[in-house]
Amino acid sequence: MTELTAKPKQTYGLIVGIEKYHESSWNVKGGGPVNDALKFAEWLCQKQGVPQGNIWLCLSPLEENQEQVEQCGLPVAEATLQTLDNIINNLLLRKSGDLLYIFWAGHGLITSERERRLLCADATYQNWQNFDLNSLLQLLSSDFFEIRNHICIIDACANCYLDIPKRPTQLGGKTFNSGKPREDSQQFVLLATRDGEKAKVSSEKTGYFSQAVREALEQAPAEIFPPNMRVVAEQVKQRLARLDKRQLPTYWYYRSWDGDKEEQHLNPFEIPHNIPQSNASKFVGREEQLKQLHQLLQDNDIVAITDVTGEGGVGKTELAIHYSWENLENYSGGCCWLNVKATDIGTQLTEFGIVNFPNFNPSGLSLDGQIQYCWRNWQSGNVLLVFDNVTDWAEVQRYLPPKGSRFKVLITTRQRVGSPYPVFPLGELSPDAALELLAKLLGQEQVEWELDKAKILCEHVGYIPLGLYQIAAICRKPGKVPC
């Protein structure tokens, strides 16, 4: 694959860092996004030789970080919706060049239609000023835009809009008009999170993702500009995995060199799924189990997550949910979640195909015929099927895909014996993990203040996650922000 090349003098940058919002409860405590934006601007200008006049720096700093902004030596604009819209539509749109970098650090969310939205500094609960990232990317790669290639680095949450309290009925937001797709454009997008995840900031006033990006860029060969973003992305993923911050950077790459060739990689907006949102506000103590489950599922077509206690509440469904989100990129054919106690399984299976796949029409066939139609006409790529809450193995027998196919099956059940499939037994948390979960639910200070009582409570509920949530529900303090 031919690498993207660009001249620094023909490179532009739109760099955004927002840590202070008109809705003050959304402020990023201690800061971080502004620091990350300034360091990215420094890398572009001082390390890569991009002219300062080619950089648009839009910041919204907390008061304690204002001096850092004043000392940066670059013109700074407000990070409001109107300012950013003007830069994109009236300034950048008139430029021609080799490459545009977009760096964005701040709050973000994802809609029920899986659209990524980026919140601007003037966002409030009454008016959620935001950009539709998808439509912006379409504008950049259209013939309306004269800068051919684009590298977008987005350090923002992808919290689900429907899970956010005090949300307006209509989200609104800025969408962009675009022209015809260009045939000579490349676009690389690197996101800090997958759908539903939160981008985390360290105590050192930097996003873990942004810091990993900087480290990867610094290690890139100095003589190559721009750095190879596939290599950068893989290094960022490895760094985040070692930190174990429960967020996984996701990227996709698009090119159309000669008008008829395109390559896509891990576009999080294009993998069909109906994975439910987690009911657990915190997920701890199961990291090793997630790795073991993945390996077991790679070695077998079907795996059943079972409850070794037989009492429920150990987190079988939550483990399946987190596994599905964390490994969605490995199942480009989609992840179909089937609730065994809801509508007929066959109906759920065929409806998933009808909704997500073009020309998918199993109507007129018998139930068995419709199921066989699914296996033969499903979208290409590996597929994950999740059968949740199975109480009788016979419930799912007729709905299982052929052995040795590209379909993997994950079953959650309380059944402890008689499984015809490889079993992944799940029990109580370790005492330390149970205490960690309680601390995350109630607050570290509160648990440390009454540590002995907290340990007794954990033991009282048998270190079962559901029991810990029930305890926390009694005394948890309110007060949540979008991300």
Image (cartoon, grey):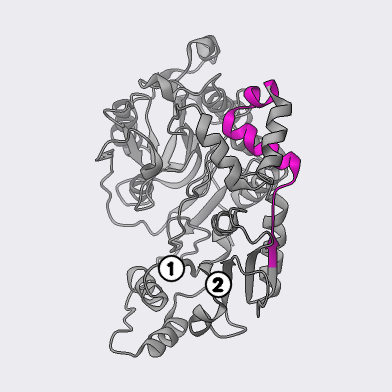
Camera-side residue: 2 or 303? 303
Mark 1 falls on what kind of element?
Answer: loop
Question: Disc 2 and disc 1: Cα gap in Å?
Answer: 26 Å
Amino acid type indicated by mark 1: Lys
State whether residue 128 is above or below residue 64.
below
Looking at the rendering, the stretch of residues picked out in magenta corresponds to 424-449
Camera-side residue: 52 or 411? 411
Determine the main secondary structure of the stretch shown in magenta: helix
The residue that appears at 55% across and 13% down in the rendered structure is 68
Q: Is residue 443 magenta?
A: yes
Earlier in the chain: of badge 2 and badge 1, it is 1
State whether residue 84 is above or below residue 158.
above
Q: Is residue 258 visible?
A: yes
Residue 368: name its quadrant: bottom left
Q: Which mark is residue 382?
A: 2
The crowd level at tag 2 (other Cα within 10 Å; few <14, some 14-19, many 20+) is some
Describe residue 108's horizontal placement relative to residue 38 as left or right: left
Q: Is residue 242 magenta?
A: no
Residue 328, position in %: x, y? 54, 60
Residue 205, position in %: x, y? 60, 23
Describe residue 198's horizontal placement relative to residue 217 as left or right: left
The residue that appears at 62% across and 53% down in the rendered structure is 314
Camera-side residue: 457 or 322? 457
Amino acid type indicated by mark 2: Asn
State whether residue 444 is above or below residue 413.
above
Please identify the quadrant where the N terminus is shown.
bottom right
Q: Which mark is residue 341?
A: 1
